[in-house]
Amino acid sequence: MTPGRGFACYLGGLLLAVAVSEGVLRGIRLRLPAWFRVPYYLILALFFLYPLALSPLLDGPRSEALLWGLFGFSPAAGLVFLTLLPAIRRGPDYVRANGSPWRWPLYPWVLFGLLACAVPARAFLLCWSMGPARRAPTATG
């Protein structure tokens, strides 16, 4: 087990996701205002970096701290989604003339709706991959 390699992979994955996102947005000339862009990248960072925050807790696989850490992903995601409030307050005029054929509320809320649907999936996969391993039943007799 090499924590350095895992850190590099997660960080590299985040940087690749940011580069691809920026490349696509610039390539198709789609304007995503800052009050939407910052929460988008915070959500990506949460998805990629939260497992790194939990990695020191893996030494005690049945520890209470690890279980609370796994539980904490969903509330953390909720807090990150709250960073969309300033964009919500600006309303549909904030994304007018954005380069998309979609009008408010389809653009940009479909993006954040998909990310919101990914939160329970990510929480499940974190618990599945980092949670306490179950022992296989042993045959007696």
Image (spheres, helix red, strand yellow):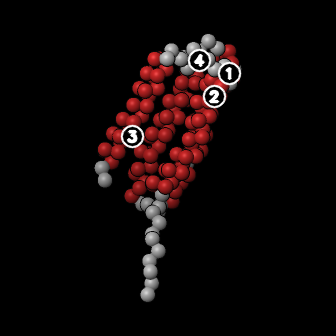
Q: CA distance from mark 2 to mark 3?
A: 26 Å
- Among the two numbered marks 2 and 3 on one chain, the one whose residue lies closer to the N terminus: 3
Residue marked by disc 4: 100
Say whether disc 1 or disc 2 marks the residue closer to the N-terminus: 1
Pointers 1 and 2 in contact (CB under 8 A)? yes
Left or right: 32 as drawn, with respect to 19: right
Residue holding disc 1: 104
Residue 120 appears in the figure: yes
What amino acid is found at the position of numbered circle 2 in the picture?
A: Trp
Q: Which mark is residue 10?
A: 3
- Residue drawn at (41%, 45%), measured in percent from left and top? 52
Rendering quarter of residue 92: top right
Crowdedness near tag 4: few (<14), some (14–19) or many (≥20) residues, C-alpha within 10 Å: some
x then y, percent, for residue 2: 30, 50
- Label 3 amino acid? Tyr
- Badge 2 element: helix
Q: Nearer the viewer, mark 1 or mark 4?
A: 4
- Give the spatial CA distance, label 1 vs label 4: 10 Å
Mark 2 neighbour density, 10 Å: few (under 14) some (14–19) many (20 or more): few
Going from the N terminus, do you reach mark 4 or mark 3 first? 3
Farthest residue to the front: give it. 101
Spot the residue most to the top. Answer: 97
Looking at the rendered structure, the secondary structure element under dot 4 is loop
Whether residues under marks 4 and 2 lie with C-beta atoms below 8 angstroms apart, the answer is no
Q: Please state which of the two labelled residues, at mark 4 or mark 3, is closer to the viewer.
A: 4
Residue bearing mark 2:
109
Q: Position of residue 77 (x, y in %)?
A: 57, 40
Which residue corresponds to the image point at 58% horizontal and 30% vertical from the top-left?
111
SS for dot 3: helix
